Image (tube, rainbow, N blue to C red):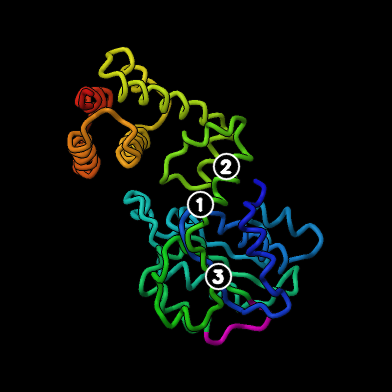
Amino acid sequence: MKNFPWIDKKISTIDKTNLSHALIIEGQEGVGKNQICKYLINELLDEKNSQNLIINNSHPDLFCINNETLFSYFKREDKNKLKSNTKKIPVGFIREAIDFVMLKSGLSKNKILFIDGAENLTINSQNALLKTLEEPPKNTYIIIQSNRFKCLNQTIYSRCQIINFNNIPQDELIRWTENIIENKNDKSVIPSYMSPKKVSQLIENGSFEDLKVLRNNLDTLFNEGIDGKLINDVIDVNIEFSEKLNYIIDFALSILKKGSSNIHPVRLSDFIEELSDFREDLFEINSLNQRYALNHLLLKIPSN
């Protein structure tokens, strides 16, 4: 995937000659933070064949903690954790990483510990990491990526260089969106909550067309009233149930804010609240006929 334009701007501000031994890159999920992490890793392990080794997660001087390696750790050390589908990064895995960075480098001058999704570090894991951050081995870099602001021990922040990702300017997001879709008018199809990474993935795998179909069907339903065939068309769109529910709520909110619907605002607001309550209760429902549930909800769209 090509770097997002705001990532290239961030990269241009990084002084590689004065790089801290530890960096925290944090902010909203899906805005491209890992693109910066990959850039730094490639720059710091810049030897022949390093790039292929990095891509395959087989570089002898790189220790990655991410979903894939976490799964492998639990499969090896604690199979019970696999059943609970936990994403918490245990202290045992951090200790393995610390042991790794204490070793001499094998191929490159530098060694790197990369922690992806650091918001999942347990308190014990953060405490174990602290000492290494305070007294890092020579030529060792620790790159920490977090999808939440200020979620780590404050002492960790005091030991690291911080690269923050606040909200991307709306006009920049709009320009970027217009450049990657075939028809500029289709930018209205993208919901407000969707990250640039998710938008890119939808376009690359062809699912953006499904989103357009969903948008058009909802537009007709909300403007022309209940129609059984249209409801079935919405239900049949090849989009995951929870994602479809999020999209319907976002669509309803957008027309409420714009005042672009003939439906009375109070009735539309009540409908949105009912959808939102249903979404919250989903976690407590053990078995759900998703088709029936969506049909039931869409039949409640207020009439004009």
Q: Nearer the viewer, residue 59 or 205?
A: 205
Q: Position of residue 126 (x, y in %)?
A: 42, 75
Q: Quadrant of residue 6?
A: bottom right
Task: Give the residue number, with chain letter if any, for mark 2.
Answer: 177
Q: Which element is circle 1 on?
A: helix
Whole-Å distance between the Cαs marked 3 and 1? Answer: 20 Å
- The single residue placed furthest to the top in the displayed view is 229
Whole-Å distance between the Cαs marked 2 and 1? Answer: 10 Å
Task: Give the residue number, with chain letter if any, for mark 3.
Answer: 163
Given this view, does label 3 or label 2 mark the residue nearer the observer? 2
Q: Position of residue 41 (x, y in %)?
A: 66, 64
Q: Position of residue 12 (x, y in %)?
A: 69, 66
Task: Give the residue number, with chain letter if any, for mark 1.
Answer: 170
Instruction: State yes or no: discs 2 and 1 in contact (Cβ < 8 Å).
Output: no
Q: Main secondary structure of the magenta part?
A: loop
- For the point 36% across and 33% down, the residue is 244
Earlier sequence position, callout 3 versus callout 2: 3
